[in-house]
Structure formats: C-alpha cells, structure tokens
Image: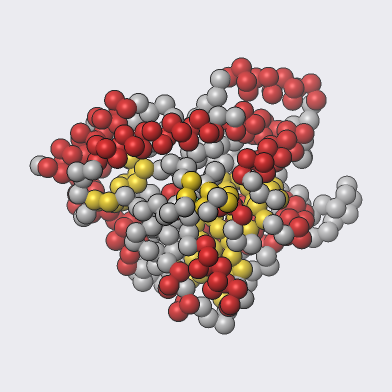
Amino acid sequence: MIPVTKPFLPPIEEYEQFVRDIWKRNWLTNNGPLVNELELNLKDYLDVKHLLYVTNGTIAIQLAIKALGLKGQIITTPFSYVATTSSIVWEGCEPVFVDIDPLTCNLDPNRIEEAISPNTTAILATHVYGNPCMVEEIEYIAKRRNLKVIYDGAHAFGVKYNGQSIQNYGDITTCSFHSTKLFHTVEGGSVVTKDPDLLKRMAYLRNFGHDGPDRFASLGINGKNSEFHAAMGLVNLKYVDQIIENRKELCQHYDEFLQQVNGVRPMVREYVRYNYAYYPVIFDTEQLAMKVFDSLNKNWIYPRRYFYPTLETLPYINTKGHCKNASSIASRVLCLPLFDTLTKEEIDMICRIVLRVQNN
Ligand SMILES: *Cc1c(COP(=O)(O)O)cnc(C)c1O
C-alpha cells in the first residue's frame, strides 16, 4: 500500500530522551520549557521575528482573524483545504471567493479589486502546495484599500521568496504542523507576525486571555500546545533540511518520468526556495485524472484529490460556481504519493501506471 503521505518518524531514542526529561520536570503543558525552546528554534529556522506555537493550523487561522478584529467580508481562495474557509465562517465573517491563477493555483491578484466591497476587511490567501502567492501585488492592493492580509502558510514551511522567509509576509502568516505536513509535531501550528502588538494579542488569545493567574486581559481560548508535541517538533526540526533535500530528489525523479504525461505541474514561481511539500499533477481532463486515480487504487496506491471539491461548494456557502479556474483544476488534479521513505522504485511503478492509463 502506498498512501499519498506517511508521517516522518525520527529515531525513537531521540524522542524518548525528551520524554524522560518531561517526566523529571513533571511539566506537561502550559508554556513549558520545550514549547519555549521550539518557538526559539522555529524563529531561528524560519527567520521570523515573532512566532507562537499553537494547538493546530486551524486554531492558528482563527487566532489570526480574531487578533486582527476582522468583521464582514474576507476575500479568499476557493482552492485550499477546508480549514481556510471554515475558520472565516467560524469567526463570524463571510468568505468572498476570488478565482485562482491556473498556472500557480494561487489566488489571482488581478481579480481581487473587483471583489472588494465596503464590507471587505481582509484578504486570506493560501500558498498552495508551498508555492508563494503574488505577495507584492496582494500587499499593494491591501495597502491601497486598507485591508489586512493573512496567509495560510500550512504548506509553506521552509519556503523562501526573494531570499526571505515566506512566513514574513502579510500581517500574520499561519502554519500547520499536522502529521501529514512536511514538518510536523503530531498536531500543531504557528502564527507569525512582525507586529509586537499583534503578537501580544495572540498570546493572550492563546491562553484564555490570562494576564497572570487571576487577571484577564481579553477574551481568549485554549490554543496552547503540550511539551510532548513540542518534543516531537524539536526532534523533527533537526531532520527537516534532510527531508526537503530527499523530497527534492524524489520530485525530480517523478519529473523525469512524467514529462510525457498529458497534463501539467503547477508553476513554481521564480526566486523561490521551494520545499517540495506536494507532487500535484493537473491532467488534461477529469476523465483521465479519474482513470489514473482508479488504476492507482487498484494497485494499492492512493493519490489524493487536493483540493476537490472547491470551497465554494461547501454546504454553508451561498455563492457557488463563480470560480471557473478553481473548479476546472480541482476536477483534474491528483497529488501523487510523496514522503520521506518513498523509494524511486515505487515512483517508477506509480509513473508506469500513470503512463499506461494515458496511452491506452
Ligand atoms: C492542513 C491545513 C490546514 C489545517 O491545519 P491543521 O493543523 O490540520 O488544523 C489549514 N490550511 C491548509 C491549506 C492545510 O493544508
């Protein structure tokens, strides 16, 4: 069986050492020493000014929306994981979908202006597959129209754009450290900002609004994460460069084999240090994509339709079917298996099946 992804697991002894230390300290959660250490190491690795380690990548988006005090409409992408949209609705705001650029699969900045209304307060865009959004264009529009910008950077761990960490863009960038992601802490996530006031607000929000044991600064929620999760992060962070390097090689192997496929890969923009988070292939037709999907399944290989259906089709969304590029790509895309222990022989097998279906 070859799934689309398998979580990276470090040598168990390295994790055990951290667990023994947790036992000695008897400090399991609530801003413990390992959480602090992980935050410092992540700030260093990602080259960002302020970072908070939180429960997961969904809470991260919700904290970001709450901390910015957003109301009304938020312009967003229909081509992302459901958490991008559900967080907007959960925070009592209305998502307004703007279509994607079919070459990069990211929110198309040229279509943002026409979607802005007097109720628009922000833009929430996803760096899909780790491919950076058009951050300069989005920033330009946001400045001119007085909108806040949040990036869902769940796929973009370790990505650099113009030599800078992609996490540095926008008012806040969120990340997910879920087990299925490139870098994981079992469950986990982060919020990153350059603004010390926003940092402070999110720190209160993460911890029930506590300002000392019996004082409260604001409304809050439980967005903390534990010492056990932080320990997994501290171990895995040591391996992340190696993981990215390995995934790069695996992707190049796919590339060589799949040059003859009737389809395209999303374009990774220039000036990017990419992280090889996913291996999406956009087939020419939905029919071909589904044939490939079925044949792979018959051989115990499980690609995923990331992201199908588009977020416009969610049952709690009223405006449907405006975003033609997103619907078209969603129907034709398959993410092929990509994880650290995947072998080149397995890739050969996957590619042979893909090409056989196509040439039949
Ligand atoms: C995984 C993911 C999330 C949610 O992160 P969790 O840590 O699972 O809550 C949000 N947005 C995108 C684009 C994701 O891929």
Which residue is drawn at the image coordinates 50% and 40% (left, top)? 181
Check the picture and name the quadrant holding the N terminus.
top left
> Which x, y percent locates residue 336?
33, 40
Image location of residue 272, percent across then percent down: 47, 50
Relative to 328, say whether 253 is above or below: above
* Residue 344: percent from left, percent from top: 32, 27
**Depth check, front residue: 86 or 341:** 341
Q: Residue drawn 52% across and 52% down?
A: 161
Tell me, yes or no, if residue 316 can be seen here: no
Query: Residue at (59%, 65%) from the top-left corner?
Result: 149
Looking at the rendered structure, the number of numbered marks drawn on it comes to 0
Question: On the image, which quarter does residue 69 sit in?
Answer: bottom right
Q: Is residue 112 above or below residue 184?
A: below
Residue sitting nearer the eye, 145 or 332 = 145
Is residue 178 toward the left or the right of residue 195 in the image?
A: left
Name the side, left or right, on which 234 lies relative to 311: right
Q: Is residue 95 above or below residue 245?
A: below
The x and y percentages for residue 203 are 75, 52
Q: On the rendered image, what quadrant is the C terminus found in?
A: top left
Q: Which of 191 and 188 is in front in this view?
A: 191
- Quadrant in the picture for residue 2: top left
What is the residue that sits farthest to the left in this orientation? 360
Left or right side of 113 for 234: right
Task: Please identify the residue farthest to the bottom as the structure is shown.
Answer: 118
> Is residue 321 in view?
yes
| Along the viewing direction, whichever of 162 and 92 lies nearer the viewer | 162
Name the image colouring.
Answer: secondary structure
**Residue displayed at 54% across by 40% down:** 178
